[in-house]
Image (tube, helix red, strand yellow):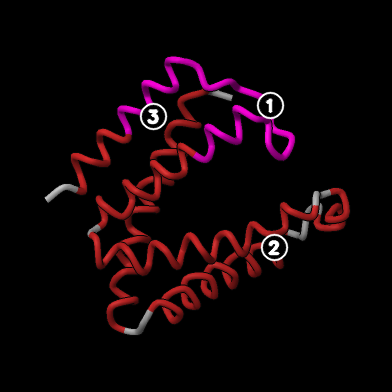
């Protein structure tokens, strides 16, 4: 598959994340965090349920081949959505997403470095360390007043 398609899909995902953060923040300010998370997850669940109803359930019967910890993804999603909903209107989109994304990069680097959860080991080398240091510098530049 063309590599450019992956980049375009990632860009679309980034745009959607920013818009979702904005819209969830608006809901959070008016209705509250749990209500915002409920509407976000509820509407997403309804849409994917309808999609599966009309296109088939695919490989759901393979659930027993998935490691138990992978099923915590929904709970992790609730934490992510709740954190975005709560922090975006209070810190601003740029600050909230900067902290979320840089934290994500640091944890991902550790997971890759140690091969946690069976992922392929990708050592943290000088280049990655320099990149992470630059990200921390970026966080400092964004969050300082």
Looking at the rendering, the stretch of residues picked out in magenta corresponds to 107-135
Is residue 88 shown in magenta? Answer: no
Q: Which residue is mark 2?
A: 52
In the rendered view, would you say 17 is above or below 117?
A: below
Image location of residue 20, percent across then percent down: 37, 61
Quarter in which the N terminus is drawn: top right
In the rendered view, would you say 2 is above or below 94?
A: above
**Horizontally, is 118 left or right of 38 in the view?**
right
> How many marks are shown on the rendered structure?
3
Residue at image position (34%, 76%) is 28
* Label 3 close to label 1 by CB (< 8 Å): no
Secondary element under disc 2, as helix, strand or loop, is helix
* Label 1 close to label 2 by CB (< 8 Å): no
Q: Which residue is mark 1?
A: 120
Image location of residue 113, percent across then percent down: 60, 27
Q: Which residue is mark 3?
A: 132
**Horizontally, is 112 left or right of 15 in the view?**
right
Determine the CA span between mark 3 and mark 2.
Answer: 39 Å
């Amino acid at each position: 598959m063309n590599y450019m398609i992956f980049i375009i899909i990632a860009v679309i995902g980034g745009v959607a994340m920013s818009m979702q953060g904005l819209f969830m923040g608006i809901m959070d300010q008016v209705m509250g965090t749990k209500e915002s998370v409920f509407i976000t997850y509820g509407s997403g669940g309804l849409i994917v349920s309808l999609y599966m109803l009309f296109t088939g359930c695919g490989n759901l019967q393979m659930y027993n081949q998935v490691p138990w910890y992978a099923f915590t993804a929904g709970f992790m999603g609730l934490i992510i959505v709740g954190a975005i909903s709560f922090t975006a209107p209070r810190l601003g989109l740029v600050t909230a997403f900067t902290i979320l994304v840089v934290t994500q990069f640091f944890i991902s680097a550790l997971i890759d470095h140690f091969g946690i959860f069976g992922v392929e080991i990708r050592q943290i080398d000088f280049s990655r360390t320099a990149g992470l240091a630059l990200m921390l510098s970026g966080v400092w530049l964004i969050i300082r007043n």
